[in-house]
Image (cartoon, grey):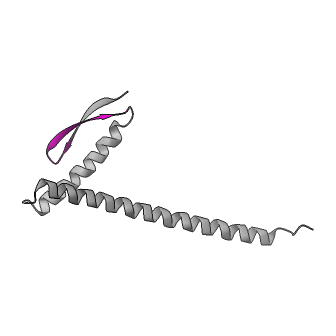
Amino acid sequence: MNQQISLLIGGKTYRLAVGDGQETRLKHVAQRVDQLIADLKNKAPDMDRDHMVVLAAIQLADDLLTTEQARETEQKNISAFNKSLAERLEKLLPTRL
C-alpha cells in the first residue's frame, strides 16, 4: 500500500507516494540531495536553483558511476582469483586415467 511522505529538499517541501518499507530509504536519499544542494548554496549563494539541482544530479550520477566501476573491478578481481584457485587445485588433484 502506498503512503504519502513529505521531503524537504533545498528549502522546499515535496510530497511523494512511496511503497511500504521505502520511507526510510527515500528520506535518506532526500537528505543526501538536500545536503548536496546546501553545500552548493554555501559555495555559490547566488547560483540559481535549477543550476544547483543539475549540479547535485551530476554529483550523484558521478558517485553512482564510481561505485559501478568499483563493483566491476571487484567482480573481475574475484573472477581472476577464482580462476587462479581452480588452476592451483587442479594441479594438486591426481589426474584420472
Q: In screen coordinates, is 69 left or right of 49?
A: right
Residue at image point 82% right, 68% down: 93
Q: Position of residue 15 (x, y in %)?
A: 22, 35
Q: Across the whole image, how many numbered discs are drawn on residues?
A: 0
Residue at image point 13% right, 53% down: 49
Q: Position of residue 65 (x, y in %)?
A: 38, 62
Q: Position of residue 97 (x, y in %)?
A: 93, 68
**Image quadrant where residue 87 sits:** bottom right
Q: Residue furthest right?
A: 97
Q: Position of residue 68 (x, y in %)?
A: 43, 61
Q: Residue furthest top?
A: 1
State the extent of the magenta-drawn residues as a range.
Answer: 8-19
Residue at image point 30% right, 57% down: 60
* Frontmost residue, 57 versus 73: 57
Q: Residue furthest left?
A: 46
Image quadrant occupied by the N terminus: top left
**Image quadrant where residue 4 sits:** top left
**Image quadrant where residue 45 sits:** bottom left
Q: Is residue 14 above or below residue 35?
A: above
Considering the whole magenta stretch, tell me its main secondary structure.
Answer: strand
* Frontmost residue, 37 versus 48: 48
Residue at image point 38% right, 31% down: 20
Q: In screen coordinates, is 47 left or right of 37?
A: left
* Frontmost residue, 55 versus 8: 55
